[in-house]
Amino acid sequence: MSKQDQIIEYIVQDIVDMLATDQNIEYDEAMNKFYNSEVFEKLQDKETGLYLESSEYIYDLFKDEMNFGHIIQAEI
């Protein structure tokens, strides 16, 4: 497993934990929700560099996707 894959795995664990806690749902349900998201797809694509961001930032993107149906990224 590459270092990038390990980082991605840790981020996924963090996000699933946060989601299960925030929504008071089972870990399996949280995993299913995240694994079926656009954010998860982008996180898996190392070319996006999303795995270099914090778990909190990625979780915020995921919450936006859940609320708005797609990823919302603020412009600077």
Image: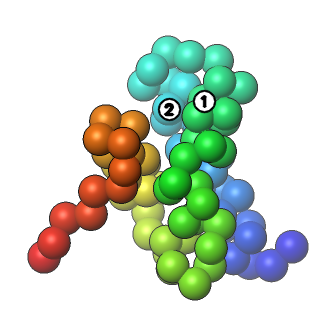
Is residue 14 visible in the rendered image? The answer is: no
Q: Pick out the residue farthest to the left.
A: 76
Q: Is residue 38 left or right of residue 62?
A: right
Q: Is residue 42 above or below residue 24?
A: below
Which residue: 42% across, 25% down? Answer: 22
Q: Amino acid at mark 1?
A: Ala
Q: Is residue 26 above or below residue 5?
A: above
Helix, strand or loop at disc 2? helix
Which residue: 65% across, 24% down? Answer: 29
| Residue on which the image places disc 2 | 19
Quick one: label 2, few (<14), some, or many (20+) residues within 10 Å?
A: many
Q: Amino acid at mark 2?
A: Leu
Is residue 10 visible in the rendered image? The answer is: yes
| Residue on which the image places disc 1 | 30
Contact check, label 2 and label 1, Cβ < 8 Å: yes
Q: Is residue 24 above or below residue 50?
A: above
Q: Pick out the residue farthest to the right.
A: 1
Residue 56 drawn at (x, y percent) = 40, 52
Mark with earlier residue (2, 1): 2
Q: Quadrant of the C terminus?
A: bottom left
Q: CA distance from mark 2 to mark 1?
A: 6 Å
Residue 47 drawn at (x, y percent) = 57, 84
Which sits in the foreground, 15 or 73?
Answer: 73
Quarter residue 16 falls in: top right
Helix, strand or loop at disc 1? helix
Q: Is residue 15 left or right of residue 27?
A: left
